Amino acid sequence: MKDYIEERALEIAKYIISEKATVRQAAGVFGVSKSTVHKDVTERLPKINPLIANMVKEVLELNKAERHIRGGKATKMKYKAVND
């Protein structure tokens, strides 16, 4: 694996952990696709640093568990803006 890919994976992981960020948020900040972020943190990161990979996995699982709530809030805001 190339060095810049390992560095990117670690930087993305640190960002996700510190900000409790979603894959989509991390992709926007780092200017890469959601697929790249997902591959970095689920496939590459465990080979580089398993401890950090587990921490990222916990954040992503929490985000997955809460996504229906965020989706509902987004829909509520959308219709509130339309009706105002």
Image (tube, grey):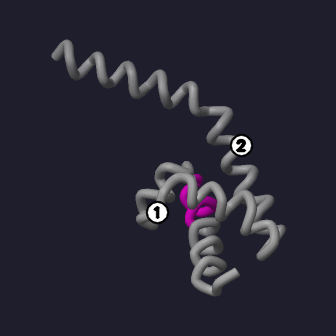
Q: Which residues are magenta?
A: 15-20
What's the mark number on residue 32? 1
Dividing the picture into quarters, in which one does residue 64 lie?
top right
Quadrant the N terminus occupies = bottom right
Q: Return the residue nearer the eye: 31 or 64.
A: 31
Dividing the picture into quarters, in which one does residue 16 lie?
bottom right
Mark 2 belongs to which amino acid? Glu
Query: Whole-percent x and y of residue 31?
Result: 41, 65
Is residue 55 placed above or below 73 in the rendered structure? below
Query: Whole-percent x and y of residue 29?
Result: 42, 63
Label 2, secondary structure: give it. helix
**Sequence order check, earlier mark of 2 and 1:** 1
Asked if residue 59 lies in the magenta stretch, the reply is no
Mark 1 belongs to which amino acid? Val
Give the side of residue 63 with respect to residue 32, left or right: right
Asked if residue 16 lies in the magenta stretch, the reply is yes
Q: What secondary structure is the stretch in magenta mostly built from? A: helix
The residue pinned by badge 2 equals 61
What's the mark number on residue 8? none
Q: Residue at x 75, y 50 (%)?
A: 58
User: How packed is label 2: few (under 14 Cα within 10 Å), some, or many (20 or more)?
Assistant: few
Q: Return the residue nearer the eye: 19 or 48.
A: 48
Q: Residue at x 57, y 32 (%)?
A: 67
